[in-house]
Amino acid sequence: MGRGEVRGTPAGRGDGAGSHEKTVLARLAGEQDALRRVARLVAQGAAPSEIFAAAAREVGAVLNADVVHLARYEHEGVAVALAGWAREGETLPPGSSTPYAGRSVTGEVLRTGQPVRIDDYDYAFGPAAERVRALGLRATVGAPIVIEGRVWASKAGWSSSPS
C-alpha cells in the first residue's frame, strides 16, 4: 500500500453506507431535485401561478401526500389558495378562500410561525377542519412560508391515512 492509501471498509459497514443512510441520502437528493426544478422555473421568469403549481406538485411528491395546498394569509381569518395538487381528484381552485378559525393546520402555522403536524383531523375543529374531513383526509403537516420576517403563506400536505 502506498502513502495515504486506505483499503477495506469499516467493520460491519459493507460498502460504507447502511441501508438507512442510503435511504436518507436518496430522500435528500430527491428533495434537492424538487427544489432545483422549482428554482429553474423562477429563473426562467415563469408566471407565479405556474411556480406555485409546480411547488405544490413537488411537495406532494416529496411528502408522498394525497393532497397539497399552498395558501396565503389575507385579512384576519382567511387563507386564499395559491395552488393545489392531488394524487386523485380535485383540489381547491386558486383564488378560493377558506376561513381558518378553529384548530387547523393553516391556522396553527400562522399562529405559531412554525411547522405543525396534526395526526388526526377528528380532533380538529372549525370550517377548514370540516372541509378536510369532508374530503376524507385525516393527517397533515404544514409549514410557514416566511417573507421579510413575517408568515406570508403556508404549505400543507394531507394524507387519507392517520399519521
Image (tube, helix red, strand yellow):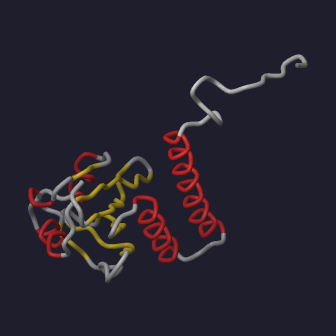
Q: Position of residue 112 (x, y in %)?
A: 25, 45
Q: Nearer the viewer, residue 125 or 160?
A: 160
Q: Nearer the viewer, residue 11 or 65?
A: 11
Position of the C terminus, as image quadrant, is: bottom left
Q: Nearer the viewer, residue 103 or 150?
A: 103
Furthest residue to the right? 2
Residue 91: quadrant of the picture: bottom left
Q: Residue at x 90, y 19 (%)?
A: 2
Q: Position of residue 105 (x, y in %)?
A: 23, 57
Left/right placement of residue 94 relative to residue 23 reads left
Q: Is residue 82 above or below residue 15?
A: below
Q: Nearer the viewer, residue 75 or 12?
A: 12
Left/right placement of residue 36 relative to residue 122 reads right
Q: Residue at x 14, y 65 (%)?
A: 129
Q: Is residue 162 above or below residue 71?
A: above
Residue 79: quadrant of the picture: bottom left
Q: Is residue 106 above or below residue 13?
A: below
Position of the N terminus, as image quadrant, is: top right
Residue 57: quadrant of the picture: bottom left
Left/right placement of residue 29 relative to residue 120 reads right
Q: Is residue 51 above or below residue 59?
A: below
Q: Position of residue 21 (x, y in %)?
A: 53, 39
Q: Position of residue 67 (x, y in %)?
A: 33, 70
Total count of labels: 0
Q: Residue at x 55, y 61 (%)?
A: 34
